[in-house]
Image: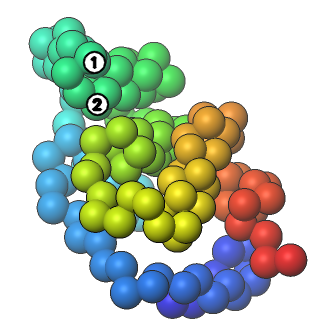
Amino acid sequence: MQVEVNGVKHDIALHGIQTHIIDFTLSRMTKGKVSLFQDLSNDPDLFKGDSSIDYQFEIYRMIKKELSNDWSQFKPKTNIFWIHYLLDKFIFHVSYKYKRSKLHSNSLKLLKTLHRTVLNYDSCLNFYTSSSLFKNE
């Protein structure tokens, strides 16, 4: 797949992986000057969930803090929080078939490195352009 980042084209190998967004319920989007969002400040119970059961409840609290509970605004750091959530799921909650393979070991090591470092970035763009993990050298 080819993507353009800051005017530079990059080829990204997908290795046959496909993703699908399946739920937009709590998402926000902007087209032109119009933003559509769910005002989560009206749902205080969402922020009371037990993060030991699912880390997503902590993610919602982190986002609430980042946005100062103003859900109309876009802050790219919130996408970083969701990347961290996905990495957490891949590392600690997915059952893998070939756990003893070198490929699995190397891949898990990379996921753990990403998990440790991703929260240091302010946006996915900053993460992609600044992290040494994405350099093709």
Task: Give the residue furthest to the front.
Answer: 100
Q: Nearer the viewer, residue 65 or 49?
A: 49
Q: Residue at x 31, y 27 (%)?
A: 55
Name the amino acid type tagged 2.
Gln
- Check disc 1 and report the residue beneath it: 51
Query: Can residue 60 be spotted in the picture?
Result: no
Q: Is residue 132 left or right of residue 106?
A: right
For the residues bearing labels 1 and 2, Cβ distance under 8 angstroms: yes
Mark 1 lies on a secondary structure that is: loop
Work out whether 78 lies above or below 46. below
Q: Nearer the viewer, residue 91 or 70?
A: 91
State the image quarter where residue 42 is shown.
top left
Badge 2 crowding class, 10 Å Cα cut-off, few under 14, some 14 to 19, many 20 or more, is many
* Res. 56 mark: 2
Residue 116: percent from the left, percent from the top?
A: 62, 36
Query: Can residue 39 be spotted in the picture?
Result: yes
